[in-house]
Image (cartoon, helix red, strand yellow):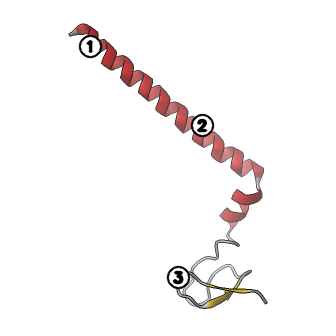
Amino acid sequence: MNQKKCPQCKNLISVTAPTCLHCGRPNKFVTNKYVKSKWNKDFKKKKLNNFKSLFSAKILFIYIFIFIIFLIILYK
């Protein structure tokens, strides 16, 4: 049986256990989010699309900000 130490309480827990039996800390190697992010391609695409939309919104905001500053400089 493979065991590892819990990073929080330092007690031995099974590698396949979902949580530590002593402190209740989730085992990151078994959690649903870890599995989805590691092997589910749709989850990766969704995360990448969210990043692209955030990135494009920031660039749009920067362009508008520069345009406003440019107009302020011209009218002074």
The residues tagged by marks 2 and 3 sit, at their Cα atoms, a distance apart of 35 Å
* Along the line of sight, the residue nearer the viewer: 7 or 60: 7
**Farthest-out residue, left:** 76
Which callout, 2 or 1, points at the residue further toward the start of the chain? 2
Q: What's the residue type where badge 2 is placed?
A: Lys
Horizontal and vertical percent position of residue 14: 71, 86
Three-letter amino acid code at the position of disc 1: Ile
Cβ–Cβ below 8 Å for labels 1 and 3? no
- The residue depicted at 70 percent of the width and 49 percent of the height is 44
Q: Nearer the viewer, mark 2 or mark 1?
A: 1
User: Residue shown at 57%/83% (left/top)?
Assistant: 24
Local SS, label 3: loop
- Per the model, the C-alpha gap separating discs 2 and 1 is 32 Å
Q: Residue at x 64, y 90 (%)?
A: 12
Q: What amino acid type is highlighted by mark number 3?
A: Gln
Q: Name the quadrant containing residue 67.
A: top left
Numbered tag placed on residue 8 in the rendering: 3
Image vertical order of residue 48 relative to residue 61, above or below: below
In the rendered view, would you say 20 is above or below 50?
Answer: below
Mark seen at residue 11: none
Percent x, y of residue 56: 54, 31
Q: Quadrant of residue 30?
A: bottom right
Q: Secondary structure at mark 1?
A: helix
Instruction: Identify residue for label 2.
Output: 52
**Does residue 7 appear left or right of residue 18 in this picture?**
left
Q: Residues within 10 Å of mark 2 (few under 14, many from 20)?
A: few
Residue carrying label 1: 73
In the depicted structure, whether residue 62 falls above or below residue 37? above
How far across and down, in percent of the image, does residue 40 sit? Answer: 76, 55
